[in-house]
Image: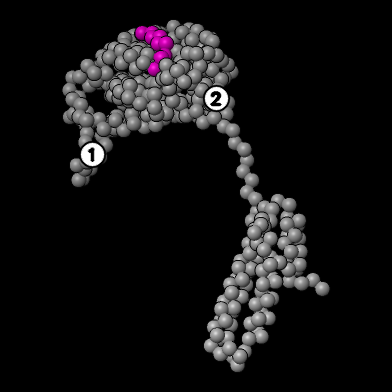
Amino acid sequence: MMDEKDSKKAYIQQRGTNNNNSMPVERNLLASVCWPFRRIFDIFINLFHNSCTDSTDGRMSRRFRRWTNRIRNAFRRNSNRQNIYHINEYPRLVLPKINVEYEYNMNHENRGIAVIYNQEYFANNTGFQKRDGTDVDLDSLIKSLERLDFKVLYFSDLNKDELIKSLRKVSSMDYSKSDCILIAILSHGQLNRIFSRDDSYHISLITSFFTDENCPSLRGKPKVFLIQACRGGQFDYGYDMQNSSNYRLRRVNMGSYEDVDVTATGLMHSALYETEMVHNPPNHPDFLIVRSTMPNYVSFRNKQNGSWFIQDLCTELNKYANELDLLTLLTFVNGQVALRESVPDKGKQTICISSMLTKRLIFHAKNRLEQS
């Protein structure tokens, strides 16, 4: 007949063999080795305990029985804990092996090129005035991007045909040894359209040149587009905040120095109501499109100090571009732009970010990577 020890052992072995995906039954080596001695000692204690009577030794007999009783109970409690430990099993948690790079590879031989299309003058048929202060934005962008090891190219006052020709040439370059590409456009705009010197074009005209199909050497690499232009004629006047002592505004004198990148009348033609075409994954990943303002709203530009968006962007790039990923940095830019306010109109502005990036984008210093 199977005793208590053998029955427990058989039960444990049966559970271990029935579940192949379970954790193997772990045995306490010390408990397994000491099991026979513990059983023999337990039997000896029981016999000696039962053989003692109060009539032979009096007080010594009672004390010895209490002592043997404690030892016996201690062995039984320990035996129960060991049995519970053996029997309890837990399913194995199998996690998939994930081998994903969470940052873009920015350790190529070159950072890449940054192309700036700066529109200051416009044809008379467009109805736009000169964009005073855009030269300040151009200088600031060149300095900030060169600090990040970009090769900066800039073009001024191109018409639509010249712009398309330039984009075609830029997209046909070999970027196999480059980290990324950056395109910046400084111009007037209306919702989804941007103006060249003589005509308007849709934002998709710019992005279509750099898709994976049209520019295969940039496949899997970040493509950043910065657009400083109005997207409508509406003004964001914000709202009054009560007890807002901790919210400090950076007031900007609207006066004769502040301007907006939209037509003087603020009228929008039928092209404004076209559906916005932004390239989405999975066919066109790794795009980052940053607009200086929300749809239908104006974008402020100071005639002496440049636009709010470009100036705050350059400030944050100079501080944190080598440390923070670009989306986090753009969040800081948005916070700085939101703190600005035109006077006396109290106009506000918020940038708009459309990200199709698939990884974090950090402009690590090239010399630091080479040394490591």
From this view, report whether residue 94 is shown above or below residue 262.
below
**Image coords of residue 335 (percent x, y):** 31, 33
Tell which residue pokes out farthest to the bottom in this image: 55
Viewer-nearest of discs 1 and 2: 1
Q: From the top left corner, tell me how far across and down residue 35 is, in percent.
A: 68, 65
Residue at disc 1, secondary structure: loop
Kindly identify the amino acid type of the residue bearing the numbered disc 2: His
Residue 152 lies in the magenta-colored region: yes
Q: Is residue 102 above or below residue 264?
A: below
Q: Residue placed farthest to the right in the image?
A: 1
Identify the magenta region.
Answer: 148-157
Q: Give the quarter of the image for residue 58.
A: bottom right
At a point 37% along the width and 29% down the height, the residue shown is 329
Q: Which residue is mark 2?
A: 284
Q: Circle 1 sits on which residue?
A: 247
Q: Is residue 274 visible?
A: no
Query: What residue do we see at 50% from left, 25% from top?
Result: 104
255 in the magenta segment: no
Establish if 242 lies above or below 43.
above
Amino acid on which the number 1 mark rests in the picture = Tyr
Give whichever of discs 1 and 2 has the lower sequence position: 1
